[in-house]
Amino acid sequence: MKENVKRCVKNKTVIISLSVILVIAVVSFLAPVLFPGADSAQDLSVRLSPPGAGHILGTDELGRNVLARLLYGTRTSFLIAILPTALAVIVGTVFGIIGAFFGKAADSAVTWASDVTLAIPGILLAMVILYTFGGSAVSVFLSIVIIEWGGIARIVRSATQRIAKSEYVKAAKTAGVGRFRIMTRHIFPNLVPTLIVLFTLNIPASVLSESSLSFLGIGIQPPGVSLGLMVNQSKQYLFDMPWLSLAPAGMILVLVLAFSFLGDALRDILDPTMKQ
């Protein structure tokens, strides 16, 4: 573990990506302090103002501060990307371990359930969920968990099966150690590097899923704010006032790239097959 931490500290990609993510996270979560109530405050006298001293990124069609809405939207996208991804990793880990460690019946059930979720296109499955339960943060949260848990469960299942074949697990079984103790003392600790990589690599997909659903008008609904919703609301001004769309689209791009680079770097560091 200490060796991996040292490798992370020395890795420029990890440091730069993590720094970008932390700066964006801190600034966006300070939005209520920096711009209290500005995400919905309207001033029609300055509607569609270009970027300037009074409004760094200009104002939208209702005279709302684009910078303030960008920070509020980024906070929403952060929460709806990170929290569902974390829950999907937890659910996928539990079912993956159960499938690999509790016999053929459990394995068949977990494999079948994950195959069903993976067989349906993610965006189509999310649209069905959102049309059923309505467009809200909770519905988007639920749809992302359902979309992602199946792939995570399959990866965890394969990793668990590999670890279960190791000599120290076989020795523990021979010594009469119970299944629960083997899972907590031998299986799960060796899964942690894989879970960290899965978490970081799935966040970009969650950001894009939330943004896509909100852009289509079935995700976060007004008066809520999200990056995808901002792009949707400003698409009619794309050629006349491109900054209205480019600001949230650029933030989506930065978040996706930062988390993708971080996940790739962590995979290279934590995956034993990548080490030389």
Image: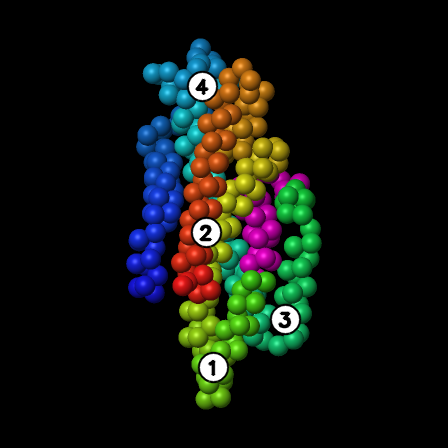
Residue ID at (69%, 51%): 120
Q: Residues within 10 Å of mark 4 (few under 14, many from 20)?
A: many
**Residue 162 picture location, percent across and down:** 53, 72
State the residue lying farthest toward the bottom: 175
Report the predominant secondary structure element of the magenta stretch. helix
Q: Residue furthest top?
A: 45
Q: Is residue 107 left or right of residue 75?
A: right
Q: Earlier in the sequence, mark 4 or mark 3?
A: 4
- The local secondary structure at tag 2 comes to helix
Q: Which residues are magenta?
A: 129-153
Residue 264's mark?
A: 2
Amino acid carrying mark 3 in the image: Asp
Say if 179 sits above or below 35 in the image: below
The answer to whether residue 198 is above or below residue 101 is above
Closer to us: 229 or 245: 245
**Cβ–Cβ under 8 Å for marks 2 and 3:** no
Q: Residue at x 30, y 64 (%)?
A: 2
Tell me which amino acid carries mark 1.
Glu
Spatial distance from mark 2 to mark 1, Cα to Cα?
A: 30 Å
**Residue at which label 1 appears:** 167
Give the CA distance from mark 4 to mark 3. 54 Å
Q: Specify the label residue 59 is tagged with.
A: 4
Residue appearing at x 54%, y 33% in the figure: 228
- Residue 128, position in %: x, y? 68, 44
Q: Which mark is residue 107?
A: 3
Q: Which SS class for mark 4? A: loop
Number of marks in the rendered image = 4
What is the CA distance from the residue labelled 3 to the residue labelled 1?
22 Å
